Image (spheres, rainbow, N blue to C red):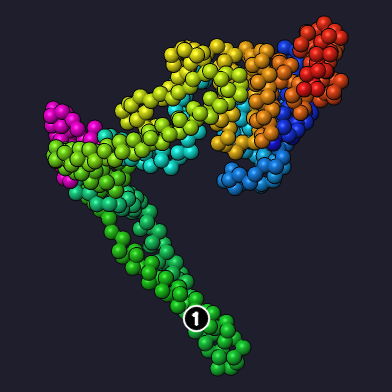
Amino acid sequence: MLSLLHIENIAVIECADISFDRGFNVLTGETGAGKSIVIDAISAILGERAYRDMIRTGTNKASVRAVFADVPELGWFADNGVEYDPETVIQREIHLDGKNVCRVNGSLVSVSILRKLGIQLINIHGQHDSASLFDEDNHLTFLDAFGDNESIRAEYAEKYDAVMRLRREIDRISMDEGEKLRRMETLRFQINEIEKAELEAGEDEELEARRKILQNAEKLSDGMEEAVECLYGGDDSDGAAGLLAQAEHALARLSRFTDAYAGIHEKIADLMYQVQDAAEEVRDARDDLSYSADELETIEARLDKIHRLRRKYGVTCADILEYLDKAKKELDEIEFADDHVEHLKKKLKKAEKEAWEAAKTLRQNRKDTALSMSQRILTELAQLDMPRVQFEVQFTEVDLTATGADSVAFYMSANAGEALKPMSKVASGGELARIMLAMKNVLAEKDQVNTLIFDEVDTGVSGRAAQKVAEKLRSVAAHKQVLCVTHLPQLAALANTHLLIAKSERDGRTYTSVTPLDVEGRKKELARIIGGTNITETTLKSAEEMLRL
């Protein structure tokens, strides 16, 4: 559950610490006092989009810090390398330059990664959720969320993917006769051009290396000659090999008189043999060094041909040969395309049959789920003073899609004797608020999120209906933490924790404060909600009576 929220420099909130408790928490206050800012701050630490406009005028950044108690050991922590702590701390900074810094238990995370954690900690239900109920595109999602049908949907998705792969493959190799002939002509030309060149993998690299040698042959030859002279000696000097041989011979003579120089003699002898071996290698390399202008010209011509092929088919000879293999395979496919298409169509027919069977299994699951969900929603609506409502999930069979072969729409009748119609055409604002609350409550039973936030979902509700909504929220709060922004005294009176959002001015600046109310404070706030700014003994007594209930 959300236990503490610390807000700095968000809109009119300079600094605020808000403590929430288990059960039913309500936030009330005058319109424009900043209740929505608190919800925006909570949304920010859940990874929702945050804007620079949120930052308080005159400051460079805004920050929010939230402490969650009794957080279960979600897989998110291990998946993202974040240390798990049942008391999880989430921090987010929003800077004027657009940069966002997010931390969970001290570890930096991205906004998108934070959002994946946020949806597992809190569900926020606002007035826009009512609009989502109008959109029939969302109805299947609502139904599946209630249905616990992940394995059936996964089985269908696998079958559907197989169908789509085969359809794409058939489309890929199916072409009209003219296009087929043009493509075959192009492929045959390319295959002939590459095969005629008789390339070998790595040939270009070998030729370029040889060309470099030939282009620098004179320098190589001069260098070899100089090395040979240094090792073997010339007309004017002894070479290194000869000098080492003389040194070895001189040290060998000393062994007749003493063994003291044996170690030095051994080292010089080793050096002599190594230099003699090296001298032989250098001389052989010099003798093997051969080059001619004709060879260089031949290599240049060959590399020029390879270069022309490179521009068309690949960076290296290996790439060109790989392209050749692909071209041959594609030519074979086109030449035998008709046979291949027939084979694929047989496979597609089988795959579509399997997909339809999986879709029908999924549909039956959804229909069973629809009956169960409808009964639960009707029970909830009866408790919300809508006992005569009829609610039904209607199915329309469609072609195979990524989500199945069903189009789903919620139909209802708000009054006895009225025909079932699409929900968007029959529900008033107050009815829709209660329907939304009923559906959210039903769906909340299926998830593990422990905190629910209702942002002015009581819009359009009053009187007895408002009392029923209040009782329902308190009932939900017996099992989950509930936070509710409201203008209704019936809801505020049933809260376990009541927070007042108030706005004031100091030195020409606007400030918002958040204050937990005691019994007297709650009585005054309820009286204000009931009677407006003109608080009388009558409104105070009404408030006191509501708190006793």
Q: Is residue 543 visible?
A: yes
Q: Is residue 506 left or right of residue 470?
A: right
Q: Quadrant of residue 370 in the image?
A: top left
User: Which residue appears farthest toward the top when viewing the image?
Assistant: 534
The residue carrying mark 1 is 269
Question: x and y percent of residue 130 in the render?
Answer: 55, 19
Is residue 70 depicted above or below 497 in this figure?
Answer: below
Secondary element at tag 1: helix
Instruction: Specify start and end residues of the magenta stretch as a single range.
Output: 169-196
Is residue 267 in the magenta section?
Answer: no
Q: Is residue 314 left or right of residue 175?
A: right
Q: Is residue 143 left or right of residue 45?
A: left
Is residue 544 depicted above or below 236 in this figure?
Answer: above
- Which residue is found at the position 81% from the left and 18% from the top? 545
Identify which residue, 100 or 430, lies in the foreground: 430
Q: Main secondary structure of the magenta part?
A: helix
Question: x and y percent of residue 211 in the render?
Answer: 31, 50
Question: x and y percent of residue 450 in the render?
Answer: 65, 36
Q: Quadrant of the C terminus?
A: top right
Q: Quadrant of residue 461 in the image?
A: top right
Identify which residue, 63 or 429, lies in the foreground: 429
